[in-house]
Amino acid sequence: YYALPALIHGGAAHVTACEWNIHALKALRYNLRANRVEDRSTVLEGDCRESLKGFLSRCNNDGEDDDDMTEDGNLNERLFDRISLGLLPSSEGGWSIAVACLRESTGGWLHVHANVPT
């Protein structure tokens, strides 16, 4: 839901989207192609609380992803400036992994979502 506006209207250089609904995945991939922004996106399938753990693990493995590393061995482009957690009724279960994925050198924005009782 948030990936396309960030890419098309927000001017994001790259968006990594996590999605667990198979129908939403199909629509996301279709719309990324249709709007010609597929090359500026990465789609991770599954619950973001799990897929981001795997993502971090792959980025921090044994240096196999050298294109993502700086000369001193730190992650380069694989940590995020903004994370939008659209998990409802509460995104609290994803806060810790989301914070771990924010760019270490500069921090970032964590957009949390929740249903609020009236």
Image (spheres, helix red, strand yellow):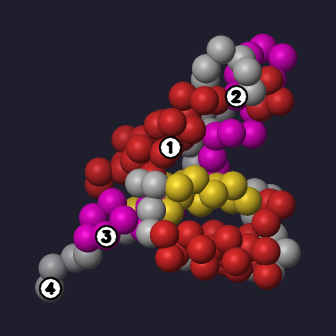
Q: Disc 3 marks which amino acid?
A: Leu
Residue type at mark 2: give it. Leu
Label whose residue precedes the other's in the sequence (3 or 2): 2
Q: Amino acid at mark 1?
A: Leu
For disc 3, the marked residue is 88
- Label located before the other in sequence (4 or 2): 2
- Give the residue number, with chain letter if any, for mark 1: 52
Residue 9 to residue 75: above or below:
below
The amino acid at mark 4 is Thr
- Quarter location, residue 43: bottom right
Residue drawn at the location 65% of the way across and 14% of the way down: 62
Q: Are marks 4 and 2 in contact (CB under 8 Å)?
A: no
Q: Is residue 96 left or right of residue 118?
A: right
Q: CA distance from mark 3 to mark 1?
A: 18 Å
Q: Residue 26: x and y, percent?
A: 59, 74
Q: Which mark is residue 75?
A: 2
Q: Which residues are magenta?
A: 69-91
What is the quadrant of the C terminus in the image? Answer: bottom left
Say if 13 sits above or below 73 in the image. Answer: below
Tell me the tag on residue 66: none
Which structural element holds mark 1?
A: helix
**Can you identify the residue that label 4 sits on?**
118
**Dots 3, 4 in contact, CB < 8 A:** no
Q: Earlier in the sequence, mark 2 or mark 1?
A: 1
